[in-house]
Image (cartoon, helix red, strand yellow):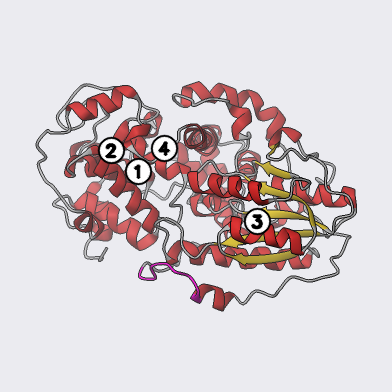
Amino acid sequence: MAERKRNLKRKGEPLKGAEKLSAARGAEREAGWLQEKVAEIRRNSTECKFNMKRLRFLSDAQKVRQGCGAVLYWMARDQRVQDNWALVYAQQLALEEKLPLHVCFCLVPRYLDSTYRQYAFMLKGLQEVAKECTSLDIQFHLLSGEPELTLPGFVKHWDIGGVVTDFSPLRLPLQWTERVKKELPPDVPFIQVDAHNVVPCWEASNKLEYAARTIRGKITKLLPEFLTEFPPVEAHPHTSTKTAKKVNWEEVMSSLEVDRSVGEVVWAQPGMAGGVAMLESFIDKRLRLFATERNNPNADALSQLSPWIHSGQLSAQRVLLEVQRWGKRLTESVASFKEELLVRRELSDNFCFYNDNYDNINGAYDWAKKTLQDHAKDSRPYLYTREQLEHAETYDQLWNAAQRQLVLEGKMHGFMRMYWAKKILEWTSSPEEAVNISIYLNDRYALDGCDPNGYVGCMWSICGIHDQGWAERHIFGKVRYMNYAGCKRKFDVGQFERRYTGKKA
């Protein structure tokens, strides 16, 4: 995170030669070119192999039960068909045993602080998944309810002989997986594939890493083994004798038990196709600016891909492959983006997997817990309630603008999120309250809420996770400090404030 605050490009600085060339090439290409190129790459990648280090057996059984009726992929975190190592492996098992292949998704009516905004994005992406599965003769099922209550009965009814699922390091998904494991028949193998990280979480490290510098070398060393092309998920030759129940998507949407006052956003088109289109625009228009302008909230320099990566509608591995392929001349920007997408993002999974307290003050390092405790009783210049913060009712117009951006657009600029969370520490009665409020607001409004990156972002800002101690000061102790004056030195704060002035949070 410390490195994210450097390298702001001066206003008006001319583009370098490579940047000009990249911009020109981007302007020459027709919209949709990347979708076509990726499809071509997949057609030529049929010989790519699945690396068995991507999986771990959760059951004692390791062979598909003989005489069964099908293989199942329980889709959870990675909601896509192509570029999905878990589905690739499930199809491989089904082909080996000459069995039909099924995909199911367990829809819970509510999840933590998620709202209609996140659910609508997810369900529209799942509609795309269902359609593609049907085109490949793979049965797609949408199950309603907690996985441990729905999956075991589904496995029995469809005579499933092997279950593959994907991986999340978060508390609730891990609990679901553990409960399902206990309910599955002992002769049905239960296999988990890390389809989200480029380097599987358990392969990158077997312990909690202290900072980016401690995991960077480990991940980099393993890239030749894991940063490969994907074999395509192809039309399945073994057809099921029974077909899945057709999903009534309107009925599903109306059944949700979530807050509908937080509505959808217009800028982010759900599904893999929408994600690839956003990736294409990043490569063509914004990648050239990433190295120098990524910390400037007024510049259009970010990838904007986190909603699709978070929901699993777009593979981070595919993103990295294409950015490296099409951004070869933009070495600084590609390197900076790789650090964020690969090292920082996978460090977040590491933190959540190996730290049970990833979303509360008990997950902080000892030095941070001590310094925050030492300053817990320091007087605060302002104290705001959660409701006041939620409605952007503070004296700080820059902070208010960031909060409005989150509420209105479902995404906050990364640099502003650091400032935003640190101010919540300064304006609430305790570090515990600051962590709770920042996570609540992020999970409620952000399309990429309820994600390891979000938890670590809040914990970095408030508890110094993956950071170091700094000069001691009021309220913050030794946790890194940020203020309005520092932001003014970095970018035109007035421009950012004006962009959201008068807009209601």
Drawn side of residue 443 relative to residue 65, left or right: left
Q: Is residue 262 magenta?
A: no
In 3D space, how far apart are the residues under numbered discs 2 and 3 (Cα atoms)?
38 Å
- The residue carrying mark 4 is 358
Q: Upstream in the sequence, badge 4 or badge 2?
A: 4
The dot on residue 490 is 2
Q: Mark 1–mark 2 contact, CB under 8 Å?
A: yes
Q: Upstream in the sequence, badge 4 or badge 1?
A: 1
The answer to whether one can see residue 394 in this image is yes
Circle 4 packing at 10 Å, graded few (<14), some (14-19), many (20+), is many
The dot on residue 80 is 3
What residue span does the magenta drawing correspond to? Answer: 254-261
Q: Mark 4–mark 2 contact, CB under 8 Å?
A: no
Query: To which quarter of the image does residue 319 belong?
Result: top right
Residue drawn at (67%, 43%) of the image: 192
The dot on residue 296 is 1
Drawn side of residue 402 relative to residue 86, left or right: left
Residue drawn at (36%, 27%) of the image: 467
In 3D space, how far apart are the residues under numbered discs 4 and 2 (Cα atoms)?
30 Å
Residue 459, position in %: x, y? 35, 37
Magenta stretch mostly in which secondary structure?
Answer: loop
Residue drawn at (13%, 47%) of the image: 383
Which of 84 and 194 lies nearest the eye of the viewer? 194
